[in-house]
Image (spheres, rainbow, N blue to C red):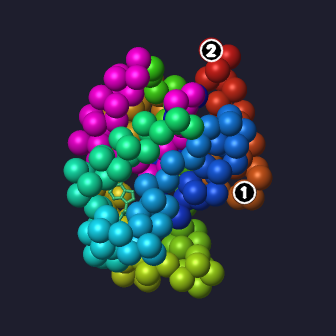
Amino acid sequence: MRMILMGPPGAGKGTQAKFVAEHFKIPAISTGDIFRANVSQGTALGVEAQRYMDAGEYVPDEVTNLMVRNRIDEADALPGFLLDGYPRTLAQVEELDGMIAFTGHALDAVVVLTVDQDEIVGRLLQRAEVEGRADDTEDVIRRRQEVYAEQTEPLIEVYRGRGLIIEVDGMGEVADVTQRIFDALDVVSES
Ligand code: AMP
């Protein structure tokens, strides 16, 4: 299974990615998590990424693409992977196409979590308190949503054109959303 989990910031991608990846026995690859790990370890990549992250902007494609390429080349990702937070730009879509084509495989599904905007801001502000993320202040949250709408939402139509989009209602209890994702993916694997 090679899949992408998409949705606006705060849609619950990270939470769901872990359950779905566990179910399919594939790694959940979160670009945001990899960037944060680099920031906390003070690596050169972390120093470069942090200024974009703190402003709610995307890290440049060249940096992000190389990081993902290296990660999906690792042995645990050979049988498949779930991408959480990548691709986020049209240039990243092209790059990912190349990476997957090179392995002789294809993408199986792109799951989009749909959520209510107001609920999202509430969730993100709550997460700011719990996790203390530097990019969860109200201004930055708003900027991250704008950037998502401008640069990432158009990707949905690209993948829809390829027949890969599965929209799943991301509202409500975490376990209910997980079940909806599983049900939707079963439909894919049966068809
Ligand atoms: P996330 O945890 O997925 O919300 O990502 C946190 C931040 O990391 C984003 O706001 C971006 O600054 C950066 N980031 C994560 N994934 C990407 C990506 N695919 N392209 C560019 N920047 C990214």
Q: Residue at x 77, y 52 (%)?
A: 175
The image shows residue 148, relative to residue 89, as above or below, that is below
x and y, in percent, of residue 17 in the image: 61, 49
x and y, in percent, of residue 86 in the image: 41, 47
| Label 1 Cα neighbours within 10 Å, binned few <14 / some 14-19 / many ≥20 | few
The image shows residue 96, relative to residue 189, as above or below, that is below
| Label 2 Cα neighbours within 10 Å, binned few <14 / some 14-19 / many ≥20 | few
x and y, in percent, of residue 98 in the image: 30, 29
Secondary-structure class at tag 1: helix
Quick one: quadrant of the N terminus? top right
Q: Residue at x 26, y 54 (%)?
A: 63
Quadrant of ligand 1: it is bottom left
Label 2 is placed on what type of residue? Ser
> Which residues make up the magenta segment?
78-104
Q: Which residue is mark 1?
A: 174
Label 1 is placed on what type of residue? Val
The residue at the far top in this view is: 191
Secondary-structure class at tag 2: loop
The image shows residue 189, relative to residue 11, as above or below, that is above
- Residue 191, numbered circle: 2
Q: For this view, does 156 lie left or right of residue 122?
A: left
Residue situated in front as seen by the camera: 19 or 179: 19
Q: For this view, does 69 lie left or right of residue 32?
A: left
- Residue 15, numbered circle: none
CB under 8 Å between discs 2 and 1: no
Quick one: quadrant of the C terminus? top right
x and y, in percent, of residue 133 in the image: 49, 78
Q: In which quarter of the view is residue 71 placed?
A: top left
